[in-house]
Amino acid sequence: MKKFLTILSVVALAIAAVSCEKGGKAPKTYPVKVQLTLFGSPFAEEGIPVSLSSGSASYSVETDAEGIVSFDVPVGIYTATTSFKKDDEDENIKRVYNGSVSITVTDQGAEMPKTISVDDPEIDPEDDGDISKPIPLPLEASQTSNLIIKELYNGGCWNERENKQYITDKYIIIYNNSAKEMDASKMCIAMAQISNTVGNAANDYNAGDGNQSYFAEGWTPASYAVWWFQEGTSVKIAPYSQIVVSICGAVDHSVTIPNSVDLSGADYVMYDKEAGFNAAAWYPAPSSTIPSSHYMKTSVFGMGTSWAIPMQNAAPFIFEPKSKIQDFVLDEGNFVNKASNKSGNFCKIPTDWVLDAVDIWKDDNNTTSFHRFSPAINTGHVVFAVNKNGSTIYRNVDKEATEAIEGNASKLVYNYAGAFSEEDTDPSGIDAEASIANGAKIVYMDTNNSANDFHVRKVASIK
């Protein structure tokens, strides 16, 4: 769990996080100020947590009355992020505010997007510390959705019998995070551009400053295909309940691969061989227990014979179109392709259609990777450095909201130990699956910030 530190603690931690210079002298630290902004104007709100992180260290402090935070850090490349909820009294709704900006601290000061330098680099910042205006951290406001991605199993497991990885058993769980029944009949599932490596040929949208050009253009790239429920199929999700969607192989994989999962009882299955996704290993005939009306339909506009969902660097999202999806994906005006082949052929999903998303990185290196969703959808990322072992990306529990539900107190199970590591776990301490089995209702975190909302779970929840 992240802890909010005082400025003095941040300085101490920054000094401890890096090696000492020759002679035991600690390296210089430089003052960095960050100002929250909304629509170009200062967002003066006290007590908002802002994190400043690099590959080796992370610091978090709260804003003062002017919406400003101050750090003292060594040279390095950092990302300043924030995510918080605020009631909108006029509209009686809760809005999520997210923001992210890259900051490079050099021995000349901090820069990005404009140079902010110490008056005299030869003067110790502890003695002077005078810098120019704070670095703006623009906020994007969005609304939370009752339909969320609860879990993604896409890394596969180890086939001990053949001593190799098994990857054709993927699934995604969609959850109703509210106390009222939700109609998901019009919901679609897609994957943002599958590569998040800076400089990759498939990424021709880098606008600098950690942004992609499509952020400002108001769309999100769907790669390879979009999936939807068959027309006329009623998809109702009860309060605090879920549907399991088999991405490939809607059969009981555990019969032949003990480490795998049983998808023969999936609620819905991505299975549309007529559309072009017909790889035999990925799309065997679904279990007879799954009605054919629960086979999802798709439009294939990328390459290959199976839907490309990487074992690492996945970026799934769900959306509800405001026009008929079958017509939308047939309109060439809704596509863009800057690549040399169909791998970069993206369907431009309007940002305001997106209900939920999760951005997954294979490591925490923000000098080589980028966020694929605009801050209006999601900020931050969850690291999935492991695969092949049956782990999943699983959503954290909203402890306060879950404990507030009437009748939950005696049903909640604590001392959660299901995370892949003690460092990256559910900070609520609530064992969601054990609590659900005990009759509890779970509200999951939904801050539109993958770093806050998800962790890596050791074992698939349906296993």
Image (spheres, grey):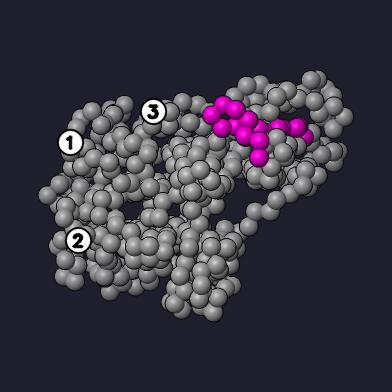
Q: Quadrant of the N terminus?
A: bottom right
Q: Is residue 65 left or right of residue 417?
A: right
- Location of mark 1 (residue): 330
Task: Tell me the CA gap for discs 2 and 3.
Answer: 35 Å
Question: Local crowd at mark 1 within 10 Å, few (<14), some, or many (≥20)?
Answer: few
Res 261 visible: yes
Q: Is residue 135 left or right of residue 373?
A: right
Q: Is residue 145 magenta?
A: no
For label 2, the residue is: 294
Label 2, secondary structure: give it: helix
Label 2 crowd bin: few (<14), some (14–19), many (20+), radius 10 Å? some
1 and 3 marks in contact (CB < 8 Å): no
Q: Position of residue 463 (x, y in %)?
A: 38, 71
Give the residue at x 43% y 32%.
215
Q: Earlier in the sequence, mark 2 or mark 3?
A: 3
Q: State how far apart marks 1 and 3 are (Cα).
A: 21 Å
- Real-space Cα distance between discs 1 and 2? 23 Å
Residue type at the position of mark 2: His
Mark 3 lies on a secondary structure that is helix
- Seen as rendered, the residue at the extreme front is 90
- Give the extent of the magenta segment: 29-45
Establish if 303 lies above or below 341.
Answer: below
Main SS, magenta residues: strand
Task: Give left or right: position of 151 versus 430.
Answer: left
Residue type (three-letter) at the residue carrying disc 1: Leu
**At 51% from the left edge and 32% from the top edge, which residue is drawn?**
210
Per the rendering, the mark at residue 257 is none
